[in-house]
Amino acid sequence: MKQTNETDFPNNFLWGAASAAYQIEGASQEDGKGASIWDTFTKIPGKTKNHTDGTVAVDHYHRFSEDIQLMAKMKLKAYRFSIAWSRIIPDGDGEINQAGLDFYGKLIDELLEQKIEPIVTLYHWDLPQALQDKYNGWESRQVIAAFKKYARTVFEAFGDRVTYWVTFNEQNVFTAMGYRWASHPPNISNIKRMYQANHIVNLANAEVITLFHELVPNGLIGPSFGYGEVVPETCHPKDVLAAMDANLLNNEWWLQVYCRGSYPKRIVDVLTQLGVMFDLTDDDQQILENPAAHPDYLGLNYYHGGTVRRPNQKRAQIDKNFETTDPYLMAADNQKETPESLLFQSVTNPYLEKTEWGWEIDPVGLQVALRRVYDKYQLPIFITENGLGALDHVTETGEIDDSYRIHFFINHLREVAAAIQTGVPVIGYCAWSFTDLLSWLNGYEKRYGFVYIDRTDTDKKNLKRLPKKSFYWYKKLIETNGELLQEGSE
Ligand code: BGP
């Protein structure tokens, strides 16, 4: 078997890092920006840790040049960020705010000056609040036209300089958390409304990709999907079937629509049985099936997968040790008569360690994800997020030894190399994240960055930037195009 070495990664491999507007920018009411649903949601008591929000975040809006200087120092090849829709069109579908366009224009130009490829996400969860108020957000088809107007504005402004675009970040996460579990805005817990909103997002995704292909013929666009392969707990044939169904429900439900324009029949049947199927018209089907509406590549965000067993056994009786702090799993566990309860039960994987926040750590699962998704859809894959949330500590001399994060990246990137060896075309890898930033529900102490930000949940301090040990390691990794991943190079 070939050793991992520099030849595993193509010469133009995009070694990157990622962020999202609400989690880093701050300046939440500056230069004409309108409120987003996250500005509103974080004001509801008890929704986020220590009442944290993105009002100041890590002040990237004012310090973006300093951040780009650090990226350049690291020799970063790509930087993924999102545009806040409500900076461009403050009320969602009305006047365009030139100051908002200017901000992203400067950001993009400074990145390009440093030879850093900008990867632009159109929607990383921060819908303009005005669209929620006027139309009921993603539950209304009127938002599709608004999204197209916003997308057209930024395609026309930056399509000449930006090659890689992402439509929606983790549609599976924001629709479930926002409309089913009420743990993200718009704070709804109604599974039927979730599936309805999700369908409208699918239409918006398809229409905007079609528009992009007209306006930016030389660019590449795709959604970033939060993928986690689901595996059976045992080789019992019914556990195998349960895992197959879980993959249909959790993964193919989105990927098949993106890439082929159809919904998996098995899940349509389950939703119909439960009375939560949404309206799907012939016109909708045409929009989704149009080849111009399909992505050029797939963005894949990877944190962890899942493990399941066959349904109809009381989990408490057979898995007394089942424990999780993941709100998604906890909520799924408490539901009766849901797609999950009909198809499978989630269990803990005994082979995997967990992060301090209870997320399973499964590097091999990343290879599985890459190979599975490529096998099925035959599209190039861009790993648009992968990273470790941890509590980092600064020594008295100002150093941050995050060797555990380096270890996490090495283990995951070795699996990326292995997937490339099997023939998966991987365009690049964006670590989550470049600087520390706001964790949506977990505040500022769950850190992901290569660069430490001196602030806590309750004290904004000086927001000073301090490169961690992983910063210097990633720099060397980039300089050697991955050679550092060889056994013994740690
Ligand atoms: C992904 C999101 C990111 C980021 C990451 C880490 O689902 O796309 O925006 O937040 O998860 O999650 P968390 O902040 O909850 O630790």
Image (cartoon, helix red, strand yellow):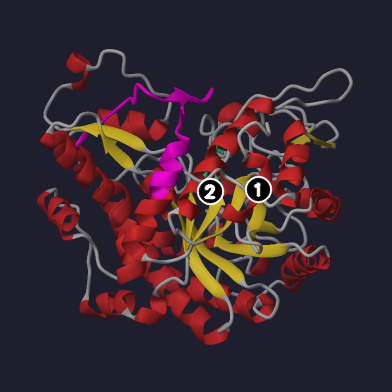
Instruction: Report the residue that reaches farthest toward the right.
Output: 397
Q: Disc 2 versus disc 1: distance between alpha carbons? A: 9 Å
Question: Which x, y percent locates residue 240?
Answer: 18, 39
Residue at 77 percent of width and 35 percent of height? 453
Q: Under tag 2, what secondary structure?
A: helix
Q: Is residue 356 above or below residue 22?
A: above
Amino acid tagged 2: Ala
Q: Under tag 1, what secondary structure?
A: loop
Q: Earlier in the sequence, mark 2 or mark 1?
A: 2
Q: Is residue 226 above or below residue 262?
A: above
Looking at the rendering, the stretch of residues picked out in magenta corresponds to: 344-369
Check if residue 346 falls in the magenta segment: yes
Q: Is mark 2 within 8 Å of ligand 1?
A: no
The answer to which of 273 and 397 lies nearer the viewer is 397
Instruction: Report the residue that reaches farthest toward the front.
Output: 1
Q: Can I make out residue 194 in this image?
A: yes
Question: Which x, y percent locates residue 97?
Answer: 70, 71
Q: Which residue is mark 2?
A: 417
Left or right of 201 on screen, residue 252: left
Q: Which residue is mark 1?
A: 482
Q: Quadrant of the C terminus?
A: top right
Check if residue 235 falls in the magenta segment: no
Q: Is mark 1 within 8 Å of ligand 1?
A: no
Q: Is residue 185 above or below residue 202?
A: above
In the rendered image, which quarter is residue 177 located in? top left
Q: Are marks 2 and 1 in contact (CB under 8 Å)?
A: yes
Residue at 30 percent of width and 33 percent of height? 307
